[in-house]
Amino acid sequence: MKPVLPGARVLSIRHWATALGLSAAIMAVQAVPATADEGDIIRSHGYSYFGNLDYPADYTHLNYVNPDAPKGGELSLAASGTFDSLNPYSRKGRAGALTTLQYDRLIESTDDSVGQYYGVLAESLEYDADRNWVIFHLRPEATFWDGTPVTAEDVVYSHRLFIEQGLPSYAQAVGRMVTGAEALDTHTVKFTFNPDLTARSRIETVGSTPVFSKAWFEADPSRRLDEPRLEVAVGSGPYKLDSYDINRRIVYKRRDDYWGKDLPFNKGRFNYDSIRVEYFADQTAAFEAFKAGEYTFRIESDPKLWATGYDFPKVAQGYVVKDAIPDGSPPTPSGFVFNLARPQFADKNVRKALALAFNFEWANESLLYGLNSPRDSFIEGTPLEAKDVPQGAELEFLKSLGDVVPPELLTQPVETVHQSNPARLNDRRNLRKAAKLLDEAGWPVGEGNVRRNAQGQTLRVNIPYPSNLPTSTATMIETFVQNLQAIGVDATAEKVDPAQYTLRSRERDYDMVYSTRYGAFLSTGGGLSQMYGSKEAAFSLFNPAGLVSPLVDAIIEASFATTNQTEQDAALMALDRALRYEFFIIPDGYIAEYWTAYYDMYEYPEQLPPYSLGYLDLWWINPEKEAALKAEGALR
């Protein structure tokens, strides 16, 4: 897992063996290896850390696309809230949706594999066996949308831009990793790496950085990566901003002159002529607009709506399709995240006590229509999920780390979520347990029936949430707060507008927050450090708890040194165990499907990839179906 940029896709996997029918080790054997030449220099059309590539150099298209998909039509989507910037790489402002579609990268990962990358801007790469350097050979035909060529200088400039003006967590991690970036000639760029740091994530990180036009940035000194702006940096990607209306809509047009449209990696992709995003104040307004046909494709996130809302006439008439599609990725490790910088949460037993006030089973039955499944693990449903007590390779891995591993981690079963009574919100048994733990931790009930410590400070838990959150999630937060108040906690839920919520999230101005920021994992790399490591914990946007754990750090560092799939798997299983041991998230549930609803003109490949829905780039519009909908008056 490479360091994470805003808007980047974090690859994660659920039901790994089920989806592929192969273990990772078998995949490595059956895949096509990169070519090693004299002096252990590897030259290849793609990259993976273990050298396995499923697609050979002469592949014609990705296995999961329809290479003959028709081009045309419009994908129209909804977003809720507001935007005031078209720069997705600044932590300031609220960036508009899908801005990253405009930028190509040297290499990109596929949606049917883990950790495999193939050339886009780069036609090939070469690197030494120790990965102390990498050279990318750019495609001479690659051009920005202003007609100028994409050069090695643009790649170097973009890299330095992220180091000097990018998100601090990314800039610091990559700044330590990369010691040099130079254009060897117009179409050849070389990166040199710090040999004292792990070889993990080096090549895929520099190769996956978006590439901007150096000339565009240098033409105006006010153009910065770390400032919000409504002027879009020149890119080379398949779509280009066509128009926008602040807080109302954004429209992107597919480039007829897109240089990379015939690449094997892009064959059958980017099929819409335009992509339109309509903005709405909240989810209710957005759903009503979908029913009216103001936009035509919806990914549903509200279980109540999924269970009860899709009985409107257009569904009955067959104009709108309700389609549940299997999701092959592990669920996002979402839930209630403690701000560990708050002193009241320093004691893990306090955190465990507060967790007992969350009744997932009641919320699932009463608010979520029984559609969610409980989640224990950070990699739920995969073969790497930690189980019971550590055994075999995982146990040996943990023992190799020495005293940083608490003895109980080796002998006690892995942390699992408590069970609650689904019939009543205030499960008295769990609330009694919670009250006892808080009493023992020095937070007895005091004046006003509120828990206070020896200094008279209340046990404060403020949970802000944005006004555009789905109703079921907002109600889940509010009812959790009710249970906390029932055991004497000074708890409040605070509904704020989306812009204020974004600011407070970035500044960690909360005691607890419902978050989807953390990511699941099935490979190792710098992204793990950004989300779960200590070095950037004070400011990383991807670590909302501010987790600082020598145990987690040691596991992540040791995972970087693994030399084969078996060793890596053992390290990641141990990481799952350690993250659950640290107890900084109260997990909520997950859904193992994509809930989609769309006007009956969209089509998708017979076999979607296991790790992506692909609605932005793999689906297409059937023109005959679109014409029929318009003739029937179902579409505007």
Image: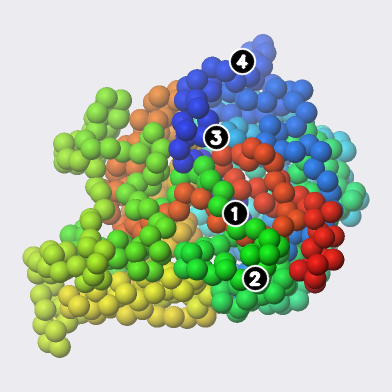
Task: Give the numbered dot on residue 357.
Answer: none
Which one is nearer the viewer's eye here, 368 or 181? 368
Q: Are marks 4 and 1 in contact (CB under 8 Å)?
A: no
Tell me the SS state at disc 3.
loop
Circle nearer the viewer, 4 or 1: 1
Amino acid type at circle 4 is: Asp
Disc 2 marks which residue? Answer: 313
Label 2 vs 4, first from the N-terminus: 4
Disc 3 marks which residue? Answer: 114
Distance CA(mark 2)–CA(mark 1):
16 Å
> Which residue is pictured at 78% across the width and 37% down the height?
67
Q: Position of residue 77 (x, y in %)?
A: 68, 64
Which one is nearer the viewer's eye here, 53 or 545? 53
Q: Local crowd at mark 3 within 10 Å, few (<14), some, or many (≥20)?
A: some
Distance CA(mark 3)–CA(mark 4):
24 Å
- Residue 408 sits in quarter: top left
Distance CA(mark 1)–CA(mark 3):
26 Å
Tell me the SS state at disc 2.
helix
Amino acid type at circle 2 is: Pro
> Which residue is pictured at 35% across the width and 30% down the height?
570
Q: Position of residue 569 (x, y in %)?
A: 40, 30
Q: Are marks 2 and 1 in contact (CB under 8 Å)?
A: no
> Which residue is pictured at 53% across the width and 21% down the height?
28
Disc 4 marks which residue? Answer: 40
Position of 550 relative to 249 (above/below): above
Label 1 vs 3, first from the N-terminus: 3
Q: Are marks 1 and 3 in contact (CB under 8 Å)?
A: no
Task: Give the numbered dot on residue 323.
Answer: 1
